[in-house]
Amino acid sequence: MKEYKKLLIIKHALQSYVKREGASELHLNQERKVLAEIEDRINRLRITPRKLTLGEYKGCGSCSYYDWCKNGKINKKKIKVRFIRNERADDWGRFVTVFSKGEEIVVEANTVGNTVLCAIAKSRLYPDYVDFISLENIEIVQ
């Protein structure tokens, strides 16, 4: 069970517990302080965005999530990335740079949870080029 869900359960239990009859004021004050701390932790979890991380791209079909992708069960997200190295591709027998180091673009990423499994991008240098990009060559820009 995720931390957020556990905290919600504790919060609801404490809210009911504080309303009970016959409790001493000392105990009620302690329980209200704990309730306030729990509510604060819940709010911090709501505000904190989950940071995406890059997975290890093994090639389409080699990934353990291949069936999910094929059946459309994978999450697709648009994310902004920066190339930390040039990305090169074969152009009829010669290798050309399709993405330059330092270039920032929006890619379509396949994700599970907060892990990027693979990403597809369209080149600005070669407008007809759309393909998977190497996760080793990029960093996520947030």
Image (spheres, grey):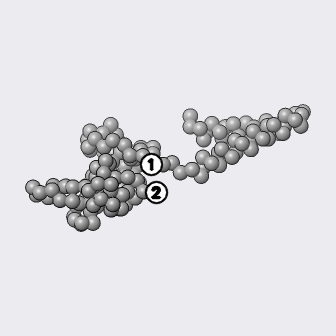
Which of the numbered marks, if any, corresponds to residue 128? none
Question: What residue sits 9% from the left and 55% below the top?
Answer: 93
Relative to 47, does residue 18 appear above or below in the rendering?
above
Q: Where is residue 19 in the image (x, y as percent from the top left)?
A: 83, 39
Residue type at mark 2: give it: Gln
Residue type at mark 1: give it: Leu
**Considering the image in quadrants, where does the N terminus appear?**
top right
Q: Where is residue 9 in the image (x, y as percent from the top left)?
A: 67, 37
Q: Can you tell which quarter of the image residue 23 is in?
A: top right
Q: Position of residue 69 (x, y in %)?
A: 33, 45
**Residue 16 appearing in the image:** no
Q: How many labels does the image show?
A: 2
Residue under pointer 2? 142
Task: Determine whether label 1 and label 2 are within 8 Å by CB.
Answer: yes
**Which callout, 1 or 2, points at the residue further toward the start of the chain?**
1
Q: Can you tell which quarter of the image residue 97 is in?
A: bottom left
Q: Does residue 100 appear to the left or right of 8 in the view shown?
A: left
- Secondary structure of the residue carrying tag 1 is loop
**Residue 96 appearing in the image:** yes
Dot 2, how many residues are within 10 Å of its Cα: few (below 14), some (14-19), or many (20+)? few
Q: How far apart are marks 1 and 2 (CA)?
A: 9 Å
- Secondary structure of the residue carrying tag 2 is loop
Q: Can you tell which quarter of the image residue 15 is in?
A: top right
Question: What residue sits 74% from the left and 41% below the top?
Answer: 35
Which of the numbered marks, if any, corresponds to residue 52? 1
Q: Name the residue nearer the viewer: 31 or 66.
A: 31
Question: What residue sits 24% from the left and 66% below the top?
Answer: 125
Q: Does residue 38 appear to the left or right of 19 in the view shown?
A: left
Q: Where is residue 116 in the image (x, y as percent from the top left)?
A: 38, 47
